Image (cartoon, rainbow, N blue to C red):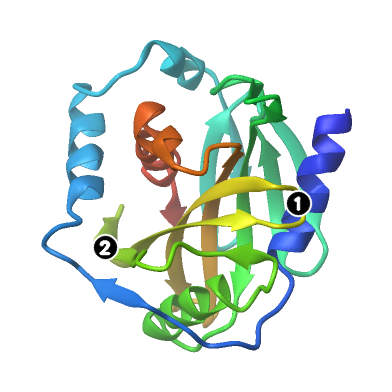
Amino acid sequence: MMKYRVLIITLLLCLKGITQVVPNVSIDSLTSRIFPVVMEALRSGVYDLPRDTSWQYLQHYESEILSLEVPDKWLNLGGLGSVVQVAFDDSGLYFQESMNDRPVLVGVFLLNVAGGSLEEVKETTLKEYRANTDRIFEPEYVDPVYTFTLTGGIKSYLLHTRFFRKSNQLNQSRYDLIIFSEKVGKGFSVMLSVQYADPTYSFEKTNAIDALAARVFNRVVLR
């Protein structure tokens, strides 16, 4: 259970601080099109990985607003405060348990995000990336932003960022599916967080984190 407590503490630290505004964003960059390619490959089955067999057995999260699915072996942590509606821990299941003598922490979270429209929710999320002083970003890194169509033709955004966390000395890759519900007038993010000890961030490509993010996001339905 120790790893779950570490994940919860890490999440709470991740959500602190919403004051500084340094967006540093490139919208639909022509050099950052890999995520849509991965999504299409996953739909066709081309990008299936051996460790993806866990997706044959799923648990469902349902609310009035949306539904999502994750493998049934992932630990459901429930809600965490007023921001996190539900959290799932995947540490030690999809990726290895440790790297360079440090834990690999993996979680999926449904977050409430402020904003009166999809565009505002996207901008809020991007600004909050750099509002937390616990994070150190690569000087030249630009957060990719992609448009994505949910089931039913509903527009959403896919965001990707990465940074070093001073508090736990881990690098973090974060992927957000940005959603706005016209039904209730509220914004949400389905967020995948992967933390590991690799200052080069090659862990992202070596372990195809974007494929895991695509697995999760492809199973989100806005009601």
- For the point 50% across and 64% down, which residue is it? 137
> In the figure, 27 relative to 95: above or below?
below
Q: Where is residue 120 shown, x and y percent of the image? A: 44, 86
Question: Quick check: 18 left or right of 116?
Answer: right
Which circle, 1 or 2, is nearer the viewer? 1
- Does residue 160 appear anywhere in the picture? yes
Question: Quick check: 140 left or right of 172?
Answer: left
Q: Where is residue 41 shown, x and y percent of the image? A: 19, 32
Q: Which residue is mark 1?
A: 10
What amino acid is at disc 1? Thr
What amino acid is at disc 2? Tyr
Q: Secondary structure at mark 1?
A: helix
Tag on residue 146? 2
- Does residue 62 appear anywhere in the picture? no
Label 2 neighbour load within 10 Å: few <14, some 14-19, many 20+:
some
- For the point 52% across and 85% down, which residue is it? 115
Q: Where is residue 153 shown, x and y percent of the image? A: 24, 61
- For the point 35% across and 17% down, which residue is it? 49
Q: Where is residue 46 shown, x and y percent of the image? A: 19, 22
> In the figure, 168 relative to 2: above or below?
below
The front one of 54 and 159 is 159
Q: Quadrant of residue 203?
A: top left
The front one of 223 and 55 is 55
Exactly how many numbered labels are in the figure?
2
Mark 1–mark 2 contact, CB under 8 Å?
no
Question: Quick check: 218 left or right of 194?
Answer: left
Q: Secondary structure at mark 2?
A: strand
Q: CA distance from mark 1 to mark 2?
A: 26 Å
> In the figure, 30 relative to 75: above or below?
below
